[in-house]
Amino acid sequence: MRSLNAALGEQNGSLPLQVADDASGSGKAKFWERTDRTDFKVEVEDIPDGSYTLEVCGGTEDVVQFQMPVALGMGELEFRSPVSDEKVLLNFDPRDCKIEVLGGDGVVLTSGDAVLSEKHPGK
């Protein structure tokens, strides 16, 4: 039996972000697509406080970067289309892309070769 989300033509995905090299912490990226809006969220925890860079689609011509502050070991960035209060306008497609959190010494958390979901033309 198909889920209600599938029946409504909605796509959802969650992707864990793995620790890179000798770093600590964890994170995840989530993507929701509904008929009236699309949301993308990246959360990190248990990493040192500071300013990090969220990089989506790194190594491609579609790369986008955003500043991600971390306080008390936690940080998050939320995107939405259409835009809403306290969320950044989602004007890029994070599916089928590597997602990384970068610190001063390089990659802290990464999705590696995993992606949220593949893009399907016409959907």
Image (cartoon, helix red, strand yellow):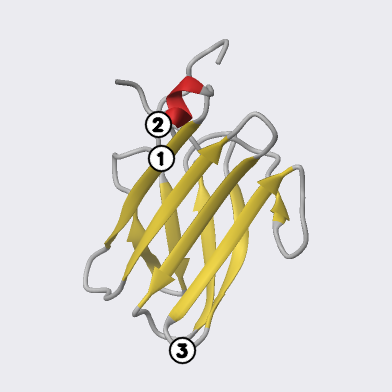
| Closer to the eye: label 3 or 1 | 1
Disc 2: which residue: 117
- Tell me the residue at 53%/67% (across/down): 76
- Please name the residue shown 60% across and 54% down the image: 65
Mark earlier in primary sequence (2, 1): 1
SS class, disc 3 = loop
Closer to the camera: disc 2 or disc 1? 1
Q: Position of residue 25 (x, y in %)?
A: 30, 74
Q: Nearer the viewer, residue 5 or 104?
A: 5
> What's the distance in space between the residues labelled 2 and 3, CA to CA?
31 Å
The residue carrying mark 3 is 72
Find disc 1 in the rendering and name its residue. Answer: 13
Residue 99: give x, y in percent of width and height: 43, 49
Q: Secondary structure at mark 1?
A: strand
Q: Amino acid at mark 2?
A: Ser
Residue 91 picture quarter: top right
Q: Is residue 18 left or right of residue 36?
A: left
- Quarter occupied by residue 98: top left
Kind of residue at disc 1: Gly
Depth check, front residue: 26 or 62: 26
Q: Amino acid at mark 3?
A: Leu
Q: Nearer the viewer, residue 15 or 55?
A: 15
